[in-house]
Amino acid sequence: MKTAPSSSKARAAQALNGTEAAAEVIADVARQMRRSGVVPKLAVVLVGEDPASMVYVANKARQAERIGYASLQVRLPARTSDAELAAVICGLNDDASVHGILVQLPLPPHLSAEAVACQIAPDKDVDGFHEVNVGRMTLRSSRSAFVPCTPLGCMHLIHQAIGHDLKGLNAVVIGKSNIVGRPMATLLMHAECTVSVAHIHTRDIEQLCRTADILVVAAGSPGLVRGDWIKPGAVVIDVGINRVDGEGGRKRLAGDVAYDEAAEIASFITPVPGGVGPMTIAMLMKNTYTAAVLAEQARMQTRAVPVTGSNGR
Ligand code: GUN
């Protein structure tokens, strides 16, 4: 089914419910887990006390426990050196009971996210940030790659909205981060979309967005995308989670898209909260289960190899 482009007159968009979709993904993983008897273990590392990161890490660990995974939280002070963090990661790499490792980003400024990602064993890199996994995903290697959770969740919602055939659709991704923008563009390219990536230096970003049958916004800028940037009938995926001033001096969450305006023009749109956010955690559960199954398969294969002496006997 491919129904995105429609230039008919404006209508109210259908909200893509990420909470429901995530619950379905998680229920499916839980079913597979019960059938296989494999119990995954996820280690989540948090360096420092960034309030948003503390919430995200707690949500990830809570979801892991709710589904029946073993989980381990490692909390390190903001002053942790790169050598100390590397030692923690090395210990988790060597711990055969741990199947998935995630180091929550952003890190304190003295630590490099790219360097840290590459210290995690690729087969435990459930975030899909290690260059081996990025390479495998980008090249569509036959060796399985972990794909970053947020773009995976966005693709799931896009497919749910307009089906699996996205061939020839124009996709615009705003943002070129390693976590969302770049892998998102790659996945859309793999789906045979014509993909543009917009960023801070993009000229006439509004006009570019108006060409998008699929618009994915990961800019970190509340309300950046206005209703008149949107092509009628487009699918709009809002990855932004911004804390902004709400009523009565309280903070509220807002996306990167001016929702009410965009919902008048788009055919499908993700709300914030309740859109992409829950999907990220669901895909993390899925990747962690995959890591555990692959580890179990590798363990069985190792056991199946006949023991031979050094001369082959
Ligand atoms: N910070 C924001 N999103 C993510 C994510 O998907 N993984 C990690 N490790 N940190 C994040």
Image (cartoon, rainbow, N blue to C red):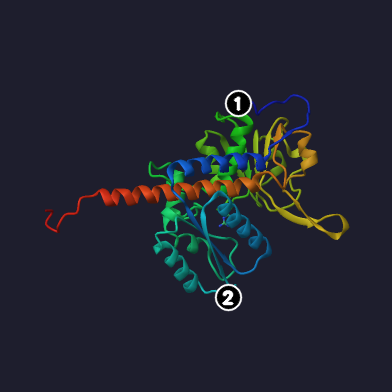
Q: Residues within 10 Å of mark 1 (few under 14, many from 20)?
A: some
Compare residues 51 and 19 and report the one nearer the observer. 19
Q: Where residue 50 sits in the image (x, y, percent)?
A: 66, 66
Determine the residue positioned at 55% across, 28% down.
Answer: 165
Q: CA distance from mark 1 to mark 2?
A: 50 Å
Q: Quick check: 159 above or below 133?
A: above
Q: Is residue 204 visible?
A: no
Instruction: Choose the circle earlier in sequence order: 1 or 2.
Output: 1
Compare residues 185 and 260 and report the one nearer the observer. 260
Compare residues 73 and 152 and report the one nearer the observer. 73
Q: Where residue 163 sits in the image (x, y, percent)?
A: 59, 29
Drawn side of residue 122 relative to residue 111, left or right: left
Quadrant housing the N terminus:
top right
- Label 2: state its secondary structure: loop
Determine the residue positioned at 52% across, 58% down.
Answer: 71
Q: Quick check: 151 above or below 55?
A: above
- Label 1: state its secondary structure: loop
Amino acid type at mark 2:
Arg
State the mark number for residue 168: none
Q: Where residue 287 sits in the image (x, y, percent)?
A: 49, 48
Compare residues 287 and 96 and report the one nearer the observer. 96
State the mark number for residue 79: 2
Q: Where residue 105 sits in the image (x, y, percent)?
A: 58, 60
Which residue corresponds to mark 1?
2
Q: Quadrant of ligand 1?
A: bottom right
